[in-house]
């Protein structure tokens, strides 16, 4: 993780209970299969944990199916605000997963209720064009002239689809008095296929807002709401659930904060122990670390 990523996660952690840091947790290196079945529920992150873009990690499908067969309740808890809840559900189906709609918890799904709290029906969206259906599904109108200065940030805009042209408009709106920036994906970085990392919406949003004076509202991991919703859906005590993810600052910190046990999948780290350097940088520890979720899960 680079300096901007650690700065962003440290800022989230300052706003959250100290429990998020997982003080005393050992980050014990283990095989995924040895721990997952001990829990009543397992919550999976999506990008970097089950897949990157459209490529599944080896064994991801079999692992989810194996857990279900073992009677473990499985949920997807994702910050992927670039896709609407409906689009995520379709993507998972295309990849071969069998998550029902009620088993998917996405930060993008909070947009409707956040808009209701703010009393708005329109806003300006900045992010990739593929994110636009999520705005419409939340019953909101995307316009460069919103009645109130509210900007929703779902993803990092791209030159390829022309969405970078939205950046100066968003800056202008965010500079108005009373402006609000809704950051729907707090992830600061994301792994790429073949190694390396790219900026994610949390970092883009923070740079966009810098110096504008806009109020920032964030939802998604590591903030508690998604975990509360996922836990309510499985009806078990937090300590009977395991959060599995590739990002210390969102998956692990959020899971720790919600009282879950946490497992870091190190498949996106170059060397098995590299995660320790990141854990030091933001002072966050998981209960477990596994090289991947696939490794011979099936009983
Ligand atoms: Mg991830």
Image (cartoon, helix red, strand yellow):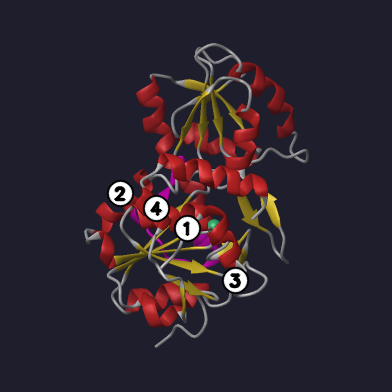
Q: CA distance from mark 4 to mark 3?
A: 22 Å
Q: Is mark 4 within 8 Å of ligand 1?
A: no
Task: Assess whether mark 4 and mark 2 are in contact (beta carbons under 8 angstroms).
Answer: no
Res 32 → quadrant: bottom left
On the image, the x and y values in percent for residue 203 come to: 62, 41
Of labels 1 and 3, the one closer to you = 1
- SS of the residue under disc 3: loop
Q: Which residue is mark 1?
A: 284
Q: Are marks 1 and 3 in contact (CB under 8 Å)?
A: no
Kindly report which numbered mark, 4 or 3, lies closer to the viewer in this rendering.
Answer: 4
Disc 1 and disc 3: Cα gap in Å? Answer: 18 Å
The magenta region covers 92-108
Tell me which label, 4 or 1, sits earlier in the chain. 4
Q: Helix, strand, or loop for circle 4?
A: helix
**Image side of residue 267 versus residue 256, left or right:** right
Residue 20 - label? 4
The nearer-to-camera label among 2 and 1 is 1
The picture quadrant for ligand 1 comes to: bottom right
Q: What residue would you read off at disc 3?
A: 267
Residue 149's disc number: none
Residue 204 percent location from the top left of the image = 64, 38
Q: Nearer the viewer, residue 138 or 194?
A: 194
Mark toward the start of the polypeptide (2 vs 1): 2
Q: CA distance from mark 2 to mark 4?
A: 14 Å
Decide: is 97 above or below 3.
below
Earlier in the chain: of badge 4 and badge 3, it is 4
How many residues crowd around disc 2 within 10 Å: few (fewer than 14), some, or many (20 or more)? few
Label 4 – label 1 distance at C-alpha: 7 Å
User: Label 2: which residue?
Assistant: 228
Closer to the chain start, of discs 2 and 3, is: 2
Check disc 2 and report its element: helix, strand or loop. helix
């Amino acid at each position: 993780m680079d300096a901007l990523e650690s700065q962003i996660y440290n800022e989230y952690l300052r706003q959250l209970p100290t429990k998020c840091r997982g003080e005393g947790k050992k980050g014990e290196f283990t095989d995924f299969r040895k721990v997952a079945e001990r829990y009543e529920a397992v919550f999976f992150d999506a990008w970097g944990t089950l897949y990157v873009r459209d490529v599944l990690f080896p064994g991801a499908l079999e692992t989810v199916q194996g857990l279900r067969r073992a009677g473990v309740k499985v949920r997807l808890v994702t910050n992927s605000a670039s896709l609407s809840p409906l689009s995520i559900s379709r993507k998972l189906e295309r990849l071969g997963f069998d998550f029902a709609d009620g088993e998917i918890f996405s930060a993008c799904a909070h947009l409707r209720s956040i808009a209701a709290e703010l009393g708005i029906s329109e806003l300006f969206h900045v992010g990739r064009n593929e994110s636009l259906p999520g705005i419409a599904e939340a019953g909101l109108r995307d316009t460069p002239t919103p009645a109130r200065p509210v900007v929703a940030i779902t993803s990092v805009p791209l030159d390829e689809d022309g969405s970078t042209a939205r950046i100066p408009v968003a800056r202008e709106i965010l500079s108005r008095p009373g402006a609000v920036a809704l950051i729907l994906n707090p992830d600061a970085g994301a792994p790429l296929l073949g190694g390396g990392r790219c900026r994610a919406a949390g970092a883009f949003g923070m740079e966009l807002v810098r110096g504008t004076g806009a109020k920032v509202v964030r939802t998604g991991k590591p903030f508690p709401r998604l975990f509360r919703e996922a836990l309510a859906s499985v009806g078990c005590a937090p300590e009977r659930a395991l959060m599995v993810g590739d990002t210390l600052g969102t998956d692990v910190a959020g899971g720790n904060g919600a009282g879950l046990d946490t497992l870091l999948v190190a498949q996106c780290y170059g060397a098995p122990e590299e995660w320790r350097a990141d854990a030091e940088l933001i002072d966050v520890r998981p209960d477990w670390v596994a090289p991947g979720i696939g490794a011979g899960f099936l009983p």
